Amino acid sequence: MPAVVLVVLLVYGLSLLAERTAPAPVNALRISVSGERWWWRIRYEPQGGQPFEVANEVRLPVNEPVEFRLHSNNVIHSFWIPALGGKMDMIPGRVNRLVLYPTRTGRFRGVCAEYCGAGHANMAFDAIVLERREFDQWLRKQSAPATTATPARPREDAP
């Protein structure tokens, strides 16, 4: 009986693994995530848009596949958003893929699930799942060229 239960659990686990690591559809959003020492570098690669980077925050459209390309340059990290499912290790010198399908909007906590050193407890990030319209607005703002601040004019009454 224990062997039968273990075989059933193995088959179930392998089916979940195949689902999470299968290639994402061609039109899926692609996000590269780099586990740094000790923070997350998130690089968006929108189709037809300019790539851009943010830190410690992932924004995703609801009900659409997202492919994460995960890598690390220093130590083993583990990318995990418990509320959205799926966890994948980030091994130096290797790129792993994780496909997620966020099914509800909201703000969720993401973490590094692998002890990676002294700053491990600080390796948390926000995963924000938005409706498509809101996500597109955010994507346009982030993809826009940066503006330079205009220098303040000296006040006339200043000494």
Image (tube, rainbow, N blue to C red):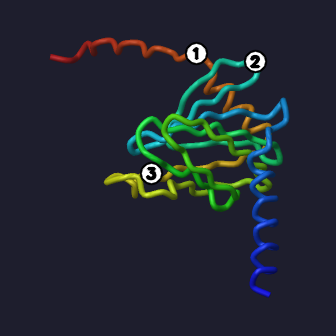
Q: Which residue is mark 1?
A: 145
Disc number at residue 123? Answer: 3
User: What's the CA distance linking mark 1 and mark 3?
Assistant: 29 Å
Expressed as whole percent of the image width and height from the top left, the position of residue 36 reads 43, 39
Q: Which residue is mark 2?
A: 48
- Which residue is drawn at the image coordinates 28% and 15% (left, top)? 155
Q: Tell me the mark number nearer the camera, choosing from 3 and 2.
A: 3
Indicate which disc, 1 or 3, sits on the residue closer to the N terminus.
3
Indicate which disc, 3 or 2, sits on the residue closer to the N terminus.
2
Label 2 packing within 10 angstroms: few (<14), some (14-19), many (20+)? few
Expressed as whole percent of the image width and height from the top left, the position of residue 141 reads 64, 26
**Residue nearest the viewer, comparing 150 with 12:** 12
Left or right placement of residue 73 versus residue 11 in this view? left
- Which residue is drawn at the image coordinates 79% and 38% (left, top)? 23
Q: Amino acid at mark 1?
A: Pro
For numbered disc 1, what is the local secondary structure?
loop
Q: Which quarter of the rendered picture does the C terminus lie within?
A: top left
Q: Amino acid at mark 2?
A: Gly
For numbered disc 2, what is the local secondary structure?
loop
